Image (spheres, grey):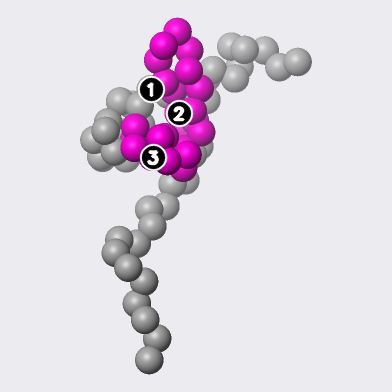
Amino acid sequence: MPKLADDLSQWISQADAARKRGVSRQAIAKLVKQGRLRKLVVGGHTLVHRDDVMAFEPKSAGRPKTRK
């Protein structure tokens, strides 16, 4: 079983994730709610995995273009 302290070093708050990505905390919370970022709840605080935040690639906005 891995040590909990080692595992927690890779988890950051939603506010820290927002600062690192240059977006709002609400944007990070929305990604968590959609299941696009892993989350860990500790003492009522939601943490997100640092690697997921840094590797996240947004989907293109809007409807896909149709082929002619």
Choose between 63 and 23: the one closer to the eye.
63
Bounds of the magenta span?
28-50
Rendered location of residue 64, percent (x, y): 36, 71
Label 2 or label 3, whichever lies nearer to me, is 3
Label 3 element class: helix
In the figure, 55 relative to 62: above or below? above
User: Residue at left 42%, top 34%?
Assistant: 32
Residue at which label 2 appears: 48
Choose between 39 and 17: the one closer to the eye.
39
Looking at numbered disc 1 in the image, what kind of residue is underneath it? Answer: Ser
Label 2 element class: strand
In the figure, 10 relative to 6: above or below? below
Mark 1 or mark 2: name the one nearer the start of the chain: 1
Counting every numbered tag in the picture gives: 3
Dots 1, 2 in contact, CB < 8 A: yes
Rendered location of residue 25, percent (x, y): 27, 31
The answer to whether residue 47 is magenta is yes
Mark 3 or mark 1: name the one nearer the start of the chain: 1
Residue at which label 1 appears: 13
